[in-house]
Image: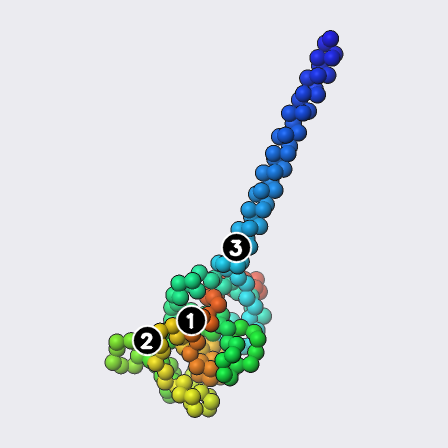
């Protein structure tokens, strides 16, 4: 009887362990699924990774850099002067590529932007005078010149309507931007770049 009782005790103990193991596995699977779901939601709705191609944002961003871009601002259409933004230029006259653009916002809705004598001048909404924009991110001696096409279109002086932004590349001599394409509407802004994640020796906030 003693042996049978012991055997029965062992069998009962094994049966109790099976539900515990299954519960642990289920908890583990749920944790992984939640983590994957959160990761997907972050990528789709909050943060994305973008690659930089070309030299239009030198010296701030070099070709081959990889940046994190936040999308939160796009839900509220809230942007600041100086933000580096990802732009969809498809269908704009003067742009025939599929890739997104990466530029810096220099003019906000309500501003009057004037390109003159190699510099950017801003007259904020409600102000009577133009002020030359301070641009410490440019290489010393960089001039902001107009392109012939942009001059024909009148993009050297633009009054920005509600939801319009004047965007320029930091490397002004080579950048195809609002001087040639005109203002960008807010629906063309895909996100705001905020951090360089690659190469590792260039990791930094921007």
Which numbered circle lies on residue 87? none
Residue 41 location (% of width, % of height): 52, 55
Residue wearing tag 1: 186
What element does badge 1 sit on? helix
Res. 80 image quadrant: bottom left
Q: Which residue is mark 2?
A: 110
Colour option used = rainbow
Quarter of the image that includes the N terminus: top right
Q: Nearer the viewer, residue 64 or 14?
A: 14
Disc 2/disc 1 C-alpha distance (Å): 13 Å
Mark 2 or mark 1, which has the lower sequence index?
A: 2
Residue 181 versus residue 122: which sits nearer the camera? 181
Residue at mark 3: 41
Q: Is mark 3 in CB contact (under 8 Å) with mark 1?
A: no
**Residue 124 found in image quarter:** bottom left
Residue plotted at (57% across, 65% down):
199
Question: Is the residue 14 above or below the residue 136 in the image?
Answer: above
């Amino acid at each position: 009887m003693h042996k049978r009782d012991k055997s029965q005790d062992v069998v009962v103990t094994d049966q109790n362990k099976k539900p515990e193991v299954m519960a642990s596995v289920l908890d583990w699977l749920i944790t992984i699924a939640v983590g994957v779901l959160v990761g997907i939601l972050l990528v789709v709705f909050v943060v994305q990774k973008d690659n930089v191609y070309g030299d239009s944002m030198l010296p701030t961003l070099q070709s081959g850099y990889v940046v994190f871009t936040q999308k939160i601002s796009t839900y509220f259409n809230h942007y600041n002067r100086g933000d580096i933004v990802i732009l969809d230029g498809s269908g704009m006259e003067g742009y025939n590529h599929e890739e997104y653009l990466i530029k810096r916002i220099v003019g906000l809705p309500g501003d009057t932007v004037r390109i003159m004598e190699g510099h950017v001048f801003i007259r904020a909404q409600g102000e009577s005078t133009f002020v030359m924009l301070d641009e410490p991110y440019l290489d010393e001696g960089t001039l902001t010149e107009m392109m012939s096409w942009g001059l024909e279109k009148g993009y050297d002086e633009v009054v920005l309507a509600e939801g319009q932004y004047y965007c320029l590349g930091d490397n002004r001599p080579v950048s195809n931007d609002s001087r040639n394409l005109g203002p960008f509407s807010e629906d063309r802004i895909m996100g705001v770049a905020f951090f360089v994640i690659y190469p590792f020796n260039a990791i930094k906030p921007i």
